[in-house]
Each structure stands twice: as structure tokens, then as C-alpha cells.
Image (cartoon, rainbow, N blue to C red):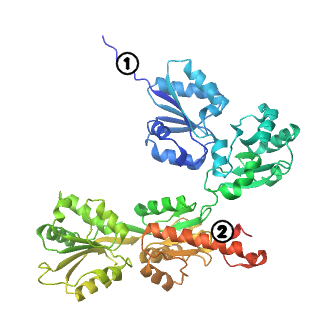
Amino acid sequence: MTRTRKPVGQIAFVGAGPGDPGLLTRRALDALVEADQVVYDRGVPESLLAHVRAQARPDAEFSPAEGVPGDVAKVLISAARSGQNAVHLVAGDPFGHDSVVKEVQAVARTAAHFEVVPGVGQAEGVATYAGVPLPGVRTAADVEDVTALDFEALATAVGRGSLALAVDAGDLAAVRDGLLAAGVDGTTAVGVTGDGTGETQYTTTSTVDSFVAAALGFTGRVVLTVGAAVTDRDKLSWWENRPLYGWKVLVPRTKEQAGVMSARLRAYGAIPCEVPTIAVEPPRTPAQMERAVKGLVDGRYAWVIFTSVNAVRAVWEKFAEHGLDARHFGGVKIACIGDATAEAVRAFGIQPELIPSGEQSSEGLLAEFSPHDEILDPVGRVLLPRADIATETLAAGLTERGWEVDDVTAYRTVRAAPPPAEIRDAIKSGGFDAVLFTSSSTVRNLVGIAGKPHARTVVAVIGPKTAETATEFGLRVDVQPPHASVPDLVEALAAYAVELREKLAAMPAKQRRGSKVQGPTALRFR
């Protein structure tokens, strides 16, 4: 009788880094994606855990690490013996924690297969994000037990270079006393950073004598940097000095489209809050789109004009239903109202013939669209697949230029459900520093489901039509990019924030206090 051998799982000790999900290594992500069970330390930030959960398998189990190292090791070994892949997710680097080293030793005494995936140490990583270099002789450590520190060695490191320690905020006084007792000059520069590499990272600078008082209010794990290099923060602090750092930005878009804008906002340091205001649904009756697709295949149209990414998606979904692909667009020219729409078309393997070089709007497209010529254009019909609430500007302009227009409802935009009460309150009370509108319908629907943004909120709009609608609703438009695209809109908001900061920095202190300018940029100067 042949026995079926039970599969053996793998154990991985994975370094999560200091908190920013972008600092997870590729191998770390692979191990987490393959995991059946993830045990995580209390030092792993909730934002990073949320990112990991989104990447992990739907049935993966997550639980906090509890008990002594031997207890955690037993959980990992038990999971591996039952055929599961188990991960212990550790803040910083696994070998930066004595307790994790003991766990690895316990696992190594068994037959379980294991690996240790390094991560960026908390102390070193946060020091870099805080703009404090650690050149020359240095010490960087993630400290679990302050009483075990060799303060004489730390004092030597401070005297000859720099020092970075990740400790609990409650241990700062003990670190100060230890450094002073070891002979460190009380006037030596110190930086204390909370929420290291996170969205709300904040660094306060002072001296060995005074850093405990300066860090009053900090909680959880903090990183202490000591030495002359702390004074370089003025020039090297990049994370906290990004243009939109700390700005809470409202993103009212469809669920499918908000992610792209949010990613760009985060790159500039903003904290985006996605509030779906529009839901995209199919037309109530599919007959129009069915005829349009048949007309495309039969050569009925000379042009197809796409005015949105949603229109592109709607046509391609209808193509897929009929087993068609990009080859069936042969002989049909494609025009796109803007760069984002053009990118959506290119994603399906087709290069548009016309994109406005100037204003990316209906007017901009009409300005460059040639009138119909019966000799040069034997087919004189244009397909215009759009939303049910689209304006008539484009269709009317094409008709004036001699084209026959099939204005087809490709999709419907409906108002989304209202956001939670706390979001609505924040919108109306000025809890958001900026709001980004990408269409007239996002303006109308946001006001309809949540109310008007507060007067102190910076209003950024993607183009002139959206600006007109915002003005109609009594909103002050502060930012409008030269080209109507999401990247340009975010870039324009970032440039506005930089201008704001420079303007406030040039003001005398008394004028700053009386300034009507709001938001994180203003608050930093008050």
C-alpha cells in the first residue's frame, strides 16, 4: 500500500520595512501573496497591513503575534506541518529583533523549510525619509529593550558620526538620561520622527537636553536621530517637503477611475479620500449600440469620436460580446477628445488619428476637425458614442461642418449613494484641503450627495466646462491645468501648493497669522 505524502509548507520571516508599502521588496510581496497564514507584529503599521491584505489570497488568515518567541514559532511550525505557507511579518528587518532571531533558531531546529526576507531597518529607513544622512561612523538600531543599550558605545558613535535608534516613545526619557550620563553634549542636535515613512510623518528637531519635551504627544514607535547630520534636514528633508504633503484631498470620481488619480496624489504627499459620485451603467436599451457596432463592421462610419474613457470601454465591451476585436476598426478613423481617452484607445492596439493639440474639449476638437468633403470623404457619417447626459456642443458642431452624426448613448451616468456622515461633514466644514473635479457631472453629483465644499477648500478643475459648472454652483475655481488630463490636474495642484508656500514664506509673521490662506501649507507657517 502506497501512502500519500502530506505536502510540507514553507515558513518565511519577512521584513516589512519602516512602514511605507513601497519599501516592501519583491520577494517580500511574493511570500505574502503565497501565504496561507500571516502573523504580524504590533509594530507593523495598519496602512501597510491594509496594503498586504489587498495583495494576499482571499482566504489567507491574518493574526497578531502574541506571546514569547517560542509561542510564535510553534504557530508557524504547526502551519507548515499542515501544508500551509506561513509568514511572520516583522517591522523593519527580521534580524533587527532579538525575539525574531530566537524564533528563527527555534524553526531551524526542526525539519521545516524556512527563509528570511530582509527589510529596510526602521531606524535607517526613517532617518532617510526624515532627511538625516548617516555618513561615516554610525549606529542604526531597532531597539526592543532600552535597558540593554550600551550608551558608552552610542556616545562614541555620536562623537564620531551619527546615531539613529527606533524606540518606543515612552522610552525617550531613558534614552536621554543614558546619553547624557555617557557624556554626550546636551546641545547636540536631535531629531524625533513619528509615523516614520507614513502619510503623517512628522519630525521635530531640538537637542539632547530638550528632545523629550519637544516630542511630547508622540506615541508608538519613533525614530531618534542624533548628531551633526540632523542639521542637514533643512536641505535634505524630502518626504515631508513634497508639494502636497499632509493635504487631505477629495477625489470625487467613479470607483474605477479614482485609483489612478489617488496614486498620483500620494506621490506628491497628499492623503486622498475617494468618494464615488458617479456610477456607470449600460444604456437602458441596447438597440442603439447594437446598430452602431454593426455599422462599424459594415463600413457605415468614416470616424468614431471618443469623448471619455468610459465611452471607449463601453464600445470595446460591446465588441467583446460579439467576438470582435481591433481588426474590425479597419478603415475607420478615430478621434479622441484628450490624452487620457487616447491612452484608453491605444490600450486596445489602435492609434488615434486626431487628438486636439490645444484645448482638450469639444471646442478644441471641433477646431481641428475638418469639414466634410464629398470627394475626399465618400463616407460622411460619424459615430459619437457618449454618456446619456453629454452636452450637444460636439454633435452640433460636426453637423455644421457637413457631417451626419449618429449620437449614440453608450453608457449612463447615475448619481452614487451619499458618502458616510463624517465625510459629508468634513466636506462642508473645511475638513478637506482640496477637491479635484474631472467633469461637470462630478461637480453636480458631489454637491447633490454631500453638499458644497467649504470656502477654504482649494477647488481644482480639469477643464473649462468643469470650471463653468463649478462656478454655476457657487464654487471658487483656484486651479485649472493648461491641458485637460488627470496628470496635468494633479501637477497643477502641486504647483499651486508650492506657490502658496512661497507666498506665505515671504509674508511677515503678523500677515501670516491674518492670512485667509488655509490648508497644511499655511498652518506650517503660523
Query: Which residue appears at 53% of the width and 80% of the height?
Result: 477
Mark 2 and mark 1 in contact (Cβ < 8 Å)? no
Left or right: residue 201 compared with residue 493: right
Dot 2 amino acid type: Thr
Residue that mark 2 sits on: 521
| Image depth: mark 1 or mark 2 in front | 2
Q: Secondary structure at mark 2?
A: helix
Picture residue at 32% right of the left edge, 84% below the top: 393
Q: Which residue is mark 1?
A: 5
Q: Relative to residue 291, is residue 321 depicted above or below?
A: above
Q: Position of residue 495 (x, y in %)?
A: 56, 70
Q: Residues within 10 Å of mark 1 (few under 14, many from 20)?
A: few
Residue 208 in picture, x, y percent from top left: 83, 47
- 154 and 253: which one is in front? 154
Q: CA distance from mark 1 to mark 2?
A: 63 Å
Say which amino acid is labelled 1.
Answer: Arg
Tell me, for residue 408, which label it has, or none.
Answer: none
Please report whichever mark, 1 or 2, sits nearer to the chain's N-terminal start.
1
Image position, residue 135 (x, y; %):
68, 43
Residue at left 77%, top 74%? 509
Point 42% across, 76% down: residue: 441
Q: Nearer the viewer, residue 82 or 129?
A: 129
Image x and y of residue 461, in percent: 48, 75
